[in-house]
Image (tube, rainbow, N blue to C red):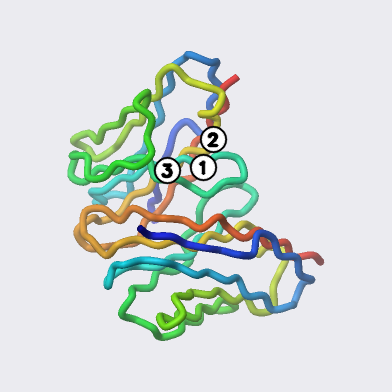
Amino acid sequence: AQKVTQAQTEISVVEKEDVTLDCVYETRDTTYYLFWYKQPPSGELVFLIRRNSFDEQNEISGRYSWNFQKSTSSFNFTITASQVVDSAVYFCALSRGQGGSEKLVFGKGTKLTVNP
Amino acid sequence: AAGVIQSPRHLIKEKRETATLKCYPIPRHDTVYWYQQGPGQDPQFLISFYEKMQSDKGSIPDRFSAQQFSDYHSELNMSSLELGDSALYFCASSLGQRNSPLHFGNGTRLTVT
């Protein structure tokens, strides 16, 4: 069975601080995909990144960076120089690498509050 | 770029009533997924369709049914509504055979009173 654990329920930081959101996953599949989604207070789910299980290269996109470590089954997300607009619930998710159905299993989410 | 369109955005129903939620996927996307997100919860997979056929099923109650039509839009039908059905319902679409990432609509917030 697939499982995603986001141990941090809530994090509160002050603007310009760096913050890392942890994600640990469990799967028996050799091919799988990992995702991060952002859910701001308005409620929509915003896609941030997808990483497949064969690509362990870290990725940076502006102030966002992701650290995928297969050895520890982790896919952590770092926001550098956080801003108030980063306040949201962030979900880590996992899916099997199968065509035709990419059902996502979500973690419980981490609520990030960035204070001015 | 066109996104996933869900309607209505908000819906208020009474217990035992029925509701129909609609989802219009991104053009050329052939796979549609429905998720339910209760208050303070993570989204839970309900059901998915690929090329108009049900492709996977999650924790969808028997009171709910869904289908994907020839134009690839999908509808989630919910009957005998219960208070516990109050949630945010998301639709997502993707290109099924290309393992493309899911793109979610803005959701329909259903309140059952």
Say what amino acid the circle numbered 1 marks: Gln
Chain holding disc 3: B
CA–CA distance in space, label 1 to label 3? 7 Å
Asked if the residues shown at circle 2 and circle 1 are in contact, with their CB atoms under 8 angstroms apart, the answer is: yes
In the image, is residue B106 above or below residue A72?
Answer: above
Say what amino acid the circle numbered 2 marks: Ala
Give the mark nearer the N terminus: 2 vs 1: 1
What residue does disc 1 label? B37
What residue does disc 2 label? B87
What residue does disc 3 label? B35
- Of residue B23 and residue B56, the one placed in the foreground of this image is B56
Q: Quadrant of residue A2?
A: bottom left
| Residue B27 image offset from top left, x and y in percent | 28, 49
In the image, is residue B22 above or below residue B113?
Answer: below
Left or right: A112 as drawn, with respect to A106: right
Q: Tell me the residue at 48%/65% (across/down).
A: A36
In the image, is residue A95 above or below residue B109?
Answer: below
Secondary structure at numbered mark 3: strand
Task: Give a yes or no on whether discs 2 and 1 share a subunit.
Answer: yes
Say what amino acid the circle numbered 3 marks: Tyr
Q: Tell me the residue at 26%/48% (across/down).
A: B31
Chain holding disc 1: B
Q: Quadrant of residue B5?
A: top left
| Residue B57 image offset from top left, x and y in percent | 29, 41
Q: Tell me the tag on residue A26.
A: none
Left or right: A11 as drawn, with respect to A5: right
Asked if the residues shown at circle 1 and circle 3 are in contact, with their CB atoms under 8 angstroms apart, the answer is: yes
